[in-house]
Amino acid sequence: MARRGEAVRAIARQLDCSRNTVRRYLRDEAARRYGPREPRACKLDDYRIYLHERVEQARPRWIPATVLLREIGERGYEGGISQLKAWLAPLKRTEPEPVVRFETPPGQQMQADFTHVRRGRDPLIALVATMGYSRATFVKFTGREDAATLCAGLREAFDYFGGVPEHVLFDNTKAVVIERDAYGPGLHRWNDEMKALAETCGFTPRLCRPYRAKTKGKVERFNSYLKGSFVVPLAATLETSGLRLEVNLANAHVRRWLDEIANERVHGTTQAVPAVRLAEERAVMLPAPALMALAAIPQRVAMPLESLQHPLAVYDALLCPELLEVFA
């Protein structure tokens, strides 16, 4: 009121108090401020120290409020669980799960996985294979994820990497294993095509623990990078001209992206270039089988023209080499 320019008499009249009282409050800065409220008595007051100790003893784990309620109830607490939960809430910190990286020696492990880019009647699926030590990666786009497609893609991956690793880590898919632990713990009934490929090429197939995608986190992480850095920019470029990303077109461009960008960047975890570390792996891997490989980059990959929606010249005009910078 005083700040609005009202007189002491007017303020005293509105507040029903004496003018001296108004003057005293206007002179005393401290009197004009509300002091902190006295803390209200709480039934938990006598148990705060005990609860703090129990919470800290259990970290990073957490003791449920129901258990703590029972413990302090035995010590005389007569309140309810709602009051206890409200008091415990600020103490409950969500501890991040520690990241444990399972690094493997050169040439020991490769992780392989199918990732869906597009579902429906015209699916677009990528077979992604990542070497565990170098993080060098091979990608083959397809419309299927059966055993024949997987085995054919693995043959191309071995040829691309220049060798065969000791182990290949897979999901528990029917394209790999028919029945897990069929003959005892760790003794699986493998898909016949996968078993034949493993015997021919000399690798041992391994399975992830069920429902534990982090077991093959190296390839899972690359799946996100592939979609964000390659698929989305390429599809967006095509869509501006009313075109759709197809299997053959994706394969025609992914090899160049792998050779010039994905496997030539400095990897965030290893802080090394995958292509450089892959040379260490080639030195210790089994020789790659003499199989059909994709054409060497920078040559273009031959594609049947009838498999595309439009003449090849249309795609060439849209996806000139300069556009590779977009996919980085």
Image: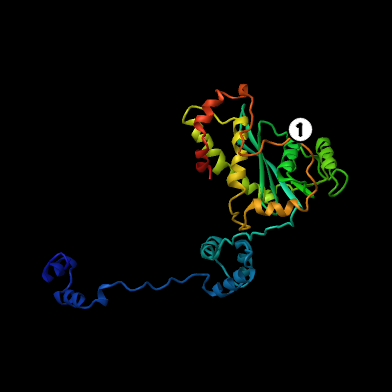
State whether residue 144 is above or below residue 159.
above
Q: How far across and down, in percent of the image, does residue 226 sit?
A: 59, 43
Q: In this view, does 205 lie to the left or right of 217?
A: right
Residue at the right extreme of this rendering: 183
Q: How far across and down, in percent of the image, does residue 100 sit?
A: 67, 59
Q: In which quarter of the image is residue 257?
A: top right
Q: Which of 156 and 130 is in front in this view?
A: 156
Q: How far across and down, in percent of the image, does residue 129 sit?
A: 69, 44
Q: Which of 210 and 75 is in front in this view?
A: 210
State whether residue 224 is above or below residue 16.
above
State whether residue 159 is above or below residue 144.
below
Q: How crowded is mark 1: few (under 14 residues within 10 Å), some or many (20 or more)?
A: few
Q: Is residue 324 left or right of residue 29?
A: right
Q: In which quarter of the image is residue 93?
A: bottom right
Which residue position is annotated with label 1?
A: 148
Q: Which of 293 and 49 is in front in this view?
A: 293
Q: Which of 20 and 16 is in front in this view?
A: 20
Secondary structure under tag 1 reads helix
Q: How far across and down, in percent of the image, does residue 20 sit?
A: 15, 77
Q: In this view, does 35 lie to the left or right of 193?
A: left
Amino acid type at image mark 1: Ala
